[in-house]
Amino acid sequence: MSERTTARGVPVDGGLPGWRRAVGGGAFALFWGWLVVRWIHDWFIVPNPAGDRTPFVPVGPFDAANEVLLSLADSLGVLGVPFDWLAGVFAFAAGAIPSLPALAQGAWLTVVLTVVSIALGFVLAVPLSVARVYGGLGLRWVALSFTELIRGTPLLAQLFVLYYGTNLTVFIRNVPGVGMGMVPDQAVWVAIIGFTINSAAYQAEYIRSALTSVHSGQLTAARAIGLGKVEGIRYVVLPQALRYAIPGWSNELIYLIKYSSLATFITVGELFNQTESIANDTYRYTELFVTAGLFYLALVLSASLVMNSVEDWTAIPGIGQSGER
């Protein structure tokens, strides 16, 4: 069976062997299937505000397997080293499984912080980038000042200023519904605001670079057929530029997934915060942080797959194929 290709013959799947695609697809389906089921179970089927949730997989069999393998390794001496390593795998699983429900809840906040922030950041980034390229001197100076200020200061410092140095938390706390039911508390909203502002600055640079890559004759042609400057930018230049900004968005999405861990410093219970809290209580630092690392890796690879699909979907045959940008 021949491989499905783009208009220029580039394999849509990147040319990966079928078994690797099957294994990768199965792993992602298993991860996201478990994660979604876990969320539904904890929110709607057996809701428990105290956070005391039972894992789907019992720990007992893993502990038992660990003990059997350790006993076998001791009896075999040097020949038992592989069994000792295998026992370590079961011991790792036994230490990590009880934390999975809490980590799933932390992963939900990580996803929310990432998706909402990059979407709102895009709304701010488009006018900022257009102002940098096509605005007057005043607008260019304002847009440049904003992007350089945000990109030139640490994200953690920005979060600290918003959370501890302003009255933003007090204002959000007094908004009706905040912190009740499915609505996050004020710390989450402050984190979203901080990540949105930070992401907007970086996205504005990606889009600005993409705008400058569109030939200036495109806007001239738009004006020649009767479109105004703003209409020409909106309907002719931006649609072309945004396609070329997708690789930059992919990087920004991945950065936000990882940088969301900084929200733990303003008391947001995202993935890293949950991991650190459980590790401090159980002293199972290796098992917990390795498991959290696997969560982040799965989220990052999922984001990459989504953005690759978006890039292939938006590519125009003959100009700007995803593999040729």
Image (tube, grey):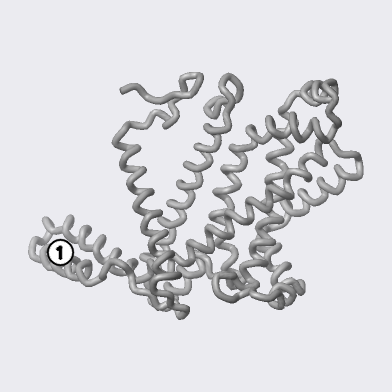
Tell me, yes or no, if residue 203 can be seen here: yes
State whether residue 283 appears in this view: no
Residue 159 location (% of width, % of height):
68, 65
Nearer to me, 95 or 2:
2
Compared to residue 195, the image places residue 277 above or below, namely below
In the displayed structure, would residue 245 be above or below residue 6? below
Left/right placement of residue 20 relative to residue 208 reads left
| Residue at 76% over, 49% down | 147
Q: Quadrant of residue 34?
A: bottom left
For label 1, the residue is 69
Instruction: Determine whether, in the image, residue 202 is placed left or right of residue 180.
Output: right
Does residue 159 sit above or below 207 in this rendering? below
Q: Position of residue 173 (x, y in %)?
A: 69, 76
The kind of secondary structure element at disc 1 is: helix
Which quadrant is home to the C terminus? Answer: top right
**Kind of residue indicated by mark 1:** Leu
- x, y percentage for residue 74? 12, 66
Q: Residue at x 26, y 70 (%)?
A: 59
- What's the residue at 69%, 61% (across, down)? 193
Q: Name the foreground residue: 238 vs 154.
A: 238
Q: To which quarter of the image does residue 278 belong?
A: bottom left
Where is residue 286 drawn, in percent x and y?
38, 65
